[in-house]
Every structure is written in structure tokens, then in C-alpha cells.
Image: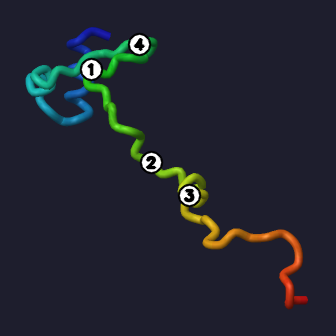
Amino acid sequence: MTQQDLDAAVAVVTGEDVCAIQQRGFSLADPLDVNFDPEPDLRPPQSVDWDELALQQNVALFAQRCGRVPGLL
């Protein structure tokens, strides 16, 4: 696929003029190049591990002893 083919395909899908698409700088990426992103996102993942969160929040207020408690059956 040439750059002109890519620009034309994007223009058809978006409904934009080919000149506008050319100005936006679309380009083909090599799928084997895993470090392609020119602006890497260095933030931590924006997701929640609910199991890990539950483990952190569900803590005992008092230590529990094994065995019988005196005075209770």
C-alpha cells in the first residue's frame, strides 16, 4: 500500500477530503516494530484490579485467636 492509497482509504472512511487527510500525517506502521509509538504513554495502567483492591481493604480490626473463647460454648 502506498501513501496515496492510505490517504485515499482514510478519506473514504472518514468522509474527509484527501488533502485534509494528507495534512494530518497518517502513515503505515510496521506490525513487527513493537516500539513504534512516537509518544509513549508513561503513565501507569488506568485499570483497577478489584481482587487486589479487596485484599487491601478487607483487613481484620482485631487479631483472631484459634481455639475456644472462654465463657462461650
Secondary structure found at label 2 = loop
Q: Residue furthest top?
A: 2
Query: Badge 4 is on which residue?
Result: 33
> What is the secondary structure assignment of the residue under circle 1?
loop
The image quadrant that residue 36 belongs to is: top left
Above or below — where is 50 with respect to 13? below
Q: Secondary structure at mark 4?
A: loop
Q: Which mark is residue 38?
A: 1
Q: Mark 3 to mark 4: distance in Å?
A: 38 Å
Q: CA distance from mark 3 to mark 1?
A: 36 Å
- Kindly report which numbered mark, 2 or 3, lies closer to the viewer in this rendering: 3
Precedes in sequence: disc 2 or disc 3: 2
Query: In the displayed structure, would residue 36 be above or below residue 53?
Result: above
- Circle 2 sits on which residue? 47
Q: Position of residue 38 (x, y in %)?
A: 27, 20
Tell me if label 3 and label 1 are in contact, CB under 8 Å: no
Circle 4: residue type: Asp
